Image (cartoon, coloured by chain):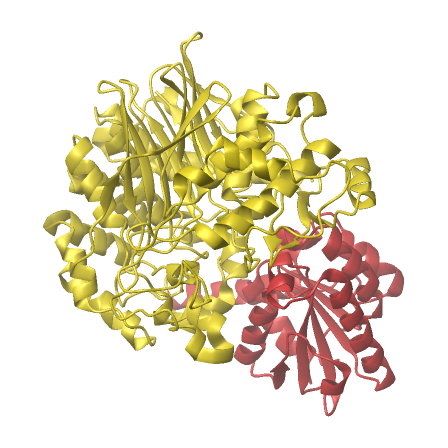
């Protein structure tokens, strides 16, 4: 019985390693430093999920749904959770233009202070759409690493954006599976 | 895109098959009634039957309702079984922690009646109860114990069964219990709503709650089970609704509400009753509309809306043409002004219903609308429209072999309600106190025992005295606009029922006398949107099949062809099936 369990554990870790591995052998371990600032690009609900995953991974983070450049002080990594939500934008009193401006300003501030960018897309296929895709296309090429729930990259959209820039892309089956690669991505 | 849709259609097919597996050996389904979803779930697909039909927002609930009809239950039995099953299969939209309205047509008696099981404010409610909470007002209104109104669903279901059904409440709850116990694979609709409401849920439920999957939202294909709800429904099945309103379940409910800062008491629960009402009646050309009266507002506003539209050559303009969208949007803005000024609980305030739905009032409003540009202001009221994205709520329709019909809309308000689930009960509590006005001077301000104005509007339409269409939808303040567009698609533009439901929708409103944008699904032709913008209309483009516009379900009776058509909205997981 115990032997069977051991085999299962090994298979689990093997399958995790396989699924979470970027296609071209790029480095995805220990490339970011803590603390990190987690914010949303598009006021999606997944930003809250990213914070839960970071907490479970024991990472040092601050969650700010509408973060500005001023909040980057003492921050070593900026985590952008991608996905436009009309519901979230409405609740925040924002429209997509204002949100895009905020994200642009935040990324500019991060670049000026040499804070690297980690992009997460956790919403899968249902968190795609024209507005989300436009935002992703603008932001993703600036990332140092990208992590996506696989169904969101079913059409290869993230792959096409990451490959030309040689940006490591980690695919996970489900949101919960992002916890371990997220943990490993940090020193 | 097509791959995505095919996956979703395949998911629906799997759910339909799950429905079959839920049934006990004594009630296995005949092959003829397995719903056959279209390959592309958004492709118009009328469910066709000759004798009876159920349409609802989840295939498992449809199967439960149909099984009730198959065993000889009437439309009321089928509707209540379906409504209860939705608590198990679509728990984020409605359930015993909420309330609603149903309209019942009794074929033999040629009579139509309404049951109002809308929630009531607790006796300690007061007009300033939210205003005094200050900056966090909105949160108090939607996520705290103060947001919970006294639930009415069980009282309404019980009243309907006792007066017009042929089966017991225990029999009507059996299908829901089976779904809650055995569970099902969640759809992408369930998953995306669970993600959207995650923040509200983590605020009010423990990480181990049924409504989260190990503390995170469910993803498509994950299995959702709710054994606590099954136990709760078994208790109610054995002991009747008093188990909920006066028993252990009620005690847990009150404790949960008060633990989150609420004011509900055991007396509030014990004194709740559903009421039977005369339906509200209006006309559109040769069609008679029967619907739920205030405090339901959806039907009333639909009649107002159609009264104005009746004056315009909409068939000549064409569906979703520039003049059509412009004129209807302008009408909606006037209706929202009326809503703020005149709508409240008629048990406590005077609502000028007959004037609002009069043709004269419609003529006066329609005459103010300019054909070439929007007005600067909409002066009938100062409606403080709080734009909420929630599509919430759920609607079902049932017709039985004898021609009895039920159209039932029920809700816990926002998706997942307050997110508060009384300990060990498995059901979610509503946040319908949020449907009261924030303004303490409003006709719809909270008060002891009052029912908040609802946007629900279950309808039955008649031609020559015979029912032709039963219809309803979730969608908050978009409900009556969406229903009117479906009615026009059928009666003016000659669409089949499901084509009418799936067609692109739009919506507008006014706020403080100023126009809100025209929200449209992205499927509208770009030239229409460009022309509307050139006319001075602000246009907000939304997803192709956006839940914001509701999730309508309908049944159409084509007497000349001796068939029944069912239409179910792909904006959610709507399906239909017949006998």
Look at the image and tell me in which quarter the C terminus of chain B lies: top left
Give the tally of numbered discs: 0
The percent coordinates of residue B9 (x first, y second) are: 55, 35
Q: Colour of chain B?
A: yellow
Rendered position, B492 above or below B347: above
Can see residue B518? yes
Rendered position, B479 above or below A131: above
Residue that sits furthest to the left in the current view:
B239
Q: Which of these two is toward me, B184 or B556?
A: B556
Report the side of B295 relative to A134 (left or right): left
Report the side of A146 relative to A16 (left or right): right
Can see residue B542? no
The percent coordinates of residue B512 (x first, y second) are: 60, 59
Look at the image and tell me in which quarter the N terminus of chain B lies: top right
Residue that sits furthest to the bottom in the current view:
A74
**Res. A99 image quadrant:** bottom right
Rendered position, B5 above or below B500: below
Report the side of A128 relative to B412 (left or right): right
Measuring 47% from the left and 44% from the top, which residue is drawn there?
B474
The percent coordinates of residue B551 (x first, y second) are: 50, 41
Q: Which of these two is toward me, A99 or B434?
A: B434
Q: Which of these two is toward me, B497 or A138?
A: B497
Residue that sits furthest to the top in the current view:
B560
Q: Which of these two is toward me, B137 or A127?
A: B137
The percent coordinates of residue B165 (x first, y second) are: 19, 32
**Res. A52 image quadrant:** bottom right
- Indicate the chain coloured red by its letter: A
Measuring 41% from the left and 11% from the top, which residue is drawn there?
B559
Measuring 74% from the left and 36% from the top, which residue is drawn there?
B371
């Amino acid at each position: 019985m115990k032997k069977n369990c051991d085999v299962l554990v090994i298979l689990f870790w093997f399958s995790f390693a396989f699924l979470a591995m970027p296609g071209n052998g790029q480095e995805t371990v220990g490339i970011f430093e803590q603390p990190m600032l987690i914010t949303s690009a598009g006021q999606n609900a997944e930003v809250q999920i990213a914070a839960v995953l970071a907490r479970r991974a024991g990472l040092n983070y601050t969650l700010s749904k509408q973060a500005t450049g001023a909040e980057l002080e003492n921050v070593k990594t900026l985590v952008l959770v991608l996905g436009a939500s009309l519901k979230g934008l409405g609740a925040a009193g924002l429209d997509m233009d204002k949100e895009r401006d905020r994200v642009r300003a935040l990324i500019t501030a991060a670049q000026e202070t040499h804070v690297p960018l980690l992009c997460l897309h956790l919403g899968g296929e249902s968190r795609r759409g024209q507005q989300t895709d436009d935002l992703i296309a603008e932001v993703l090429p600036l990332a140092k690493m990208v992590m996506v729930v696989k169904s969101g990259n079913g059409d290869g959209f993230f792959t096409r954006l990451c490959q030309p820039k040689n940006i490591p892309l980690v695919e996970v089956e489900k949101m919960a599976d992002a916890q371990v690669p997220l943990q490993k991505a940090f020193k | 895109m097509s791959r995505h849709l095919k996956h979703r259609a395949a998911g629906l097919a799997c759910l339909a098959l799950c429905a079959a597996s839920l049934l006990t050996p004594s009630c296995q389904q005949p092959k003829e009634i397995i719903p056959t979803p279209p390959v592309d779930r958004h492709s118009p697909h009328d469910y066709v039957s000759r004798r009876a039909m159920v349409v609802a927002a989840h295939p498992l609930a449809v199967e439960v309702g149909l099984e009730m009809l198959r065993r000889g239950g009437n439309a009321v039995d089928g509707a209540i079984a379906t409504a209860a099953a939705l608590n198990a299969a679509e728990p984020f939209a409605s359930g015993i922690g909420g309330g609603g309205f149903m309209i019942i047509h009794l074929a033999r008696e040629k009579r139509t009646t309404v049951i109002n099981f809308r929630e009531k404010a607790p006796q300690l409610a007061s007009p300033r109860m939210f205003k005094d909470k200050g900056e966090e007002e909105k949160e108090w209104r939607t996520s705290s114990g103060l947001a919970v109104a006294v639930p009415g669903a069980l009282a309404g279901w019980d009243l309907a069964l006792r007066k017009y059904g042929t089966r017991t409440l225990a029999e009507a709850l059996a299908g829901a219990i089976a779904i809650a116990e055995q569970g099902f694979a969640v759809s992408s609709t369930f998953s995306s709503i669970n993600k959207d409401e995650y923040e509200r849920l983590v605020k009010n439920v423990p990480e181990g709650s049924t409504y989260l999957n190990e503390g995170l939202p469910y993803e498509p294909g994950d299995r959702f089970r709710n054994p606590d709800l099954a136990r709760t429904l078994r208790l109610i099945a054995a002991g009747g609704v008093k188990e909920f309103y006066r028993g252990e379940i009620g005690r847990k409910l009150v404790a949960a509400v008060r633990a989150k800062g609420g004011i509900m008491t055991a007396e509030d629960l014990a004194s709740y009753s559903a009421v039977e009402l005369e339906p509200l009646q209006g006309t559109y050309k040769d069609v008679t509309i029967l619907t739920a009266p205030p405090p339901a507002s959806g039907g009333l506003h639909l009649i107002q809306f159609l009264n104005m539209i009746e004056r315009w050559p909409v068939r000549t303009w064409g569906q979703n043409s520039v003049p059509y969208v412009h004129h209807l949007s302008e009408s909606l803005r006037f209706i929202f002004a009326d809503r703020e000024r005149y709508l409240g609980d008629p048990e406590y305030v005077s609502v000028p219903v007959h004037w609002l739905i009069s043709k004269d009032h419609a003529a006066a409003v329609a005459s103010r609308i300019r054909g070439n540009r929007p007005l600067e202001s909409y002066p009938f009221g100062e409606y403080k429209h709080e734009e909420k994205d929630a599509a919430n709520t759920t609607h079902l329709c049932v017709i039985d072999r004898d021609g009895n019909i039920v159209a039932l809309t029920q809700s816990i308000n926002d998706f997942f309600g307050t997110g508060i689930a009384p300990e060990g009960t498995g059901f979610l509590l509503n946040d319908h106190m949020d449907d009261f006005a924030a303004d303490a001077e409003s006709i719809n301000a909270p008060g002891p025992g009052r029912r908040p104005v609802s946007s629900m509007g279950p309808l039955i339409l008649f031609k020559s005295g015979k029912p032709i269409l039963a219809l309803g939808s979730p969608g908050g303040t978009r409900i009556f606009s969406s229903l009117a567009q479906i009615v026009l698609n059928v009666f003016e533009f000659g669409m089949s029922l499901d084509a009418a439901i799936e067609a692109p929708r739009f919506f507008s409103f006014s706020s403080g006398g100023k126009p809100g944008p025209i929200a449209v699904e992205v499927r509208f032709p770009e030239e229409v949107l460009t022309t509307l913008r050139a006319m001075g209309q602000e246009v907000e483009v939304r997803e192709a099949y956006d839940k914001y516009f509701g999730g309508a379900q309908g049944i159409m009776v084509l007497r000349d062809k001796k068939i029944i058509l069912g239409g179910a909205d792909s904006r959610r997981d709507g399906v239909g099936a017949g006998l």
